[in-house]
Image: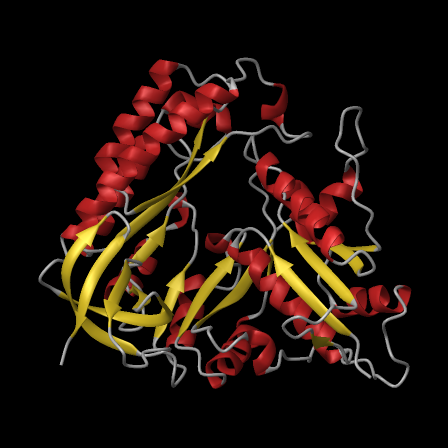
Amino acid sequence: MKYTFLLKSLGCKVSQYDGIRIAEYLSGCGLRQAGEGETPDLYILNGCAVTGRASQKVRQALRAIRRRWPSVKLVLAGCEARLAEKRAPEEGDEPAVEIDGALPYATPPAVRELLEHLDLLRPDIPDAGDEAHVPEELIGSERTRAFLKIQDGCSQFCAYCIVPHLRGPETSRGRAELVDEARRIVATGRREIVVTGIHVGRYAHGLVALLRELSAIAGLDRIRLSSIEPVEVESDLVEWLATDPKACAHLHLPLQSGCDETLRAMRRPYDTATFAALVGRLRARMPDIGISTDLIVGFPGETDERFAATLAFVERQSFSRIHIFRYSTRDGTPAATMPGQVPNAVKQTRAKAVERLWKSSAASFHGRFVGRSVDVLWETRENGFWHGLSREYVPCRTATEADLHNVITPATVTAADPDGCVTRIDP
């Protein structure tokens, strides 16, 4: 009999990648994913700790899992598990959910040790080492893209960020190892690889050189970069984006604030002029490139005037998408004790103002494709519409009875709104 498990990952692309790796190791240790309606022997929640809200979601998820399966062996993994190791309980904390184990680091030895501790490792299962690969039924047949983590850790230590304290210093994987993993990904039928990491721009073995090697893999149609720091977008990367037929014309550049005083307080390594100049260079080379960003509202010391400066700057950049974060304190970071903490109600008001602005800019960006053809990788079908993403990271939808799963087609955009584009499959 095989023990069963379920695993859920919360948070960023790196967390999602780490969750897949944990699933690989569990499979290599003889466990199988629990089926629909089946009670799992083990549930691993791979939790995010980047914000206070993220940690709250982890606690809510743990309580829900424990209520649904009171006897399941419940394990907390990922950044939230690392944070729990460092943080002592404080007066006024919510009652802790009883868990049976922790998995702060997703390595084969750690997974095997955890299973031994929980008495879920059959004695006849050999040590699979680092070569266990996730079976197709674990991946999920709906998947059309895959993450490839090239780097972990961060040494930047922005004033608000807990990640360097949890992920540790920067480390980069070897190019040969990554190309081999990418080939295995493509062999499962994936059409797109998303290159990800905590600090992708500091990949130690040459980011563009790696991208060129990935592009040479037969059967791979698309390569997309996840978040990259604006000061690390060099001319060779811009040229690769503009000329490689497999490169997706999209970059996620975390801005965090559009006010220079706030950027300095955040300890960000650029100012608004530097950021705007990069956006200008990118659009001069690729007029249709999608540029998305992260923005923190309510950082300590952000006055109404500073927020107004941010709002004006954001409007000028015309982002295609904005991930909005209301600042939350993370113990151990410099910002946690800074003066001028902003009330939650003000943060919420500012977040709504940014959301209105980016919905308008998203509609404008999507509208420029009306009447034009875009290449779409179709992924899921819901309520009669197929949904997918263009190379520019524009959400597209089309009404058809044809099976478009994991198919790339040209499609003419017939209408646009803040949520994406309505398309018609080209003949």
Q: Is residue 120 left or right of residue 398?
A: right
Name the quarter where the C terminus is drawn: bottom left
What residue lies at 73% left-to-right and 62% top-to-bottom? 43
Q: How many marks?
A: 0
Task: Give the quarter of the image for residue 49.
Answer: top right
What residue lies at 21% left-to-right and 46% top-to-bottom? 363
Q: Which residue is at the front of the view, 364 or 312?
A: 364
Image coordinates for residue 394, horizontal then vertical, percent: 28, 58
What residue lies at 54% left-to-right and 17% top-to-bottom? 341
Q: Is residue 258 above or below residue 254?
A: above
Task: Give the quarter of the image for residue 412.
Answer: bottom left
Image coordinates for residue 31, horizontal then vertical, percent: 75, 77
Q: Is residue 129 above or below residue 313?
A: below
Q: Is residue 350 left or right of residue 424?
A: right
Image coordinates for residue 126, horizontal then vertical, percent: 83, 84
Q: Which residue is at the front of the view, 137 or 211?
A: 137
Image coordinates for residue 192, horizontal then vertical, percent: 40, 72
> Quick check: can you spot residue 394?
yes
